[in-house]
Image (cartoon, rainbow, N blue to C red):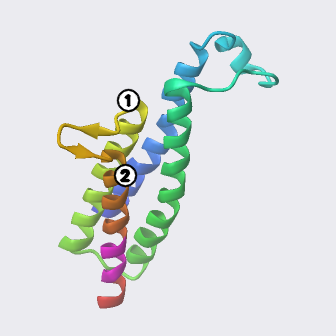
Amino acid sequence: MTYELTVLLINALLCLGLPWVYNYGYAKQPGVGGKRLMGNRDDLPERTGVAARGLRAHQNQQENLLPFAIIVLIAHQVNISNMVTMACATLFLIARIAHASFYLAGITRIPGVNGVRSIAYFVSLFSMLVYTSQLFLG
C-alpha cells in the first residue's frame, strides 16, 4: 500500500472514530443515556456541547474525506506518487486531526491566533489543491 493510501485509510478511521467520541458525550447528556441511544432515537433532546460539536466535526470530516479520497485514488490509478503528494497527504491528515480536535474541545483560538479551526480547514483544503496540481503536472 502506498503512503498516500495509508494516509487515506487513517483519515477514514478518523471519520469512523468521531461518532464514538461525540455519541459518548451525547449519552451523558441529561435525558439521553445509552439505552435510548440504542433505540430508534425518537424524541431525544437536542445535542449540546461536545455532542453537538462532534457531530459537526464528523460532518465536516465526511465532506472533506470524499474529495481527498477521489484525489488519492486517481493519483494512485495513474501512478503518481512523489514527495509533494506525500507531503500533501501528511499535511491533510495533520490538519484534519487538528480540526476535529479543536472542534471537539471547543477551541476557537489559541494565544495570538484567532480562528484556529478555520485555519486547520484551509490548510487541509490547500493541501488537497496542491495534491491535485500533481495530477495535472505529472
Magenta span has 28? no
Please give left or right for residue 93 compared with residue 31 in the image: left
Residue 58 as seen in the image, left or right of residue 109: right
Q: Which residues are magenta?
A: 129-134
Prevailing secondary structure of the magenta residues: helix
* In the rendered image, the vertical position of residue 44 relative to residue 31, given as above or below: below
Residue 129 in sight in this render? yes
Residue 47 percent across, percent down from the top left:
62, 26
Quadrant where the N terminus is found in the figure: bottom left
Circle 2: residue type:
Ser
Residue ID at (50%, 34%): 54
Q: Measure the alpha-carbon separation of dots 1 and 2.
A: 14 Å
Q: Which mark is residue 105?
A: 1
| Residue sitting at x 57%, y 25% | 48
Residue 2 seen by the camera:
no
Check disc 1 and give the amino acid type: Ala
Q: Which residue is mark 2?
A: 118
130 relative position to 41: left or right: left
Compared with 99, 73 (above or below) is below
Q: Quadrant of residue 89?
A: bottom left
Q: The residue tagged with tag 1: helix, strand or loop?
A: helix
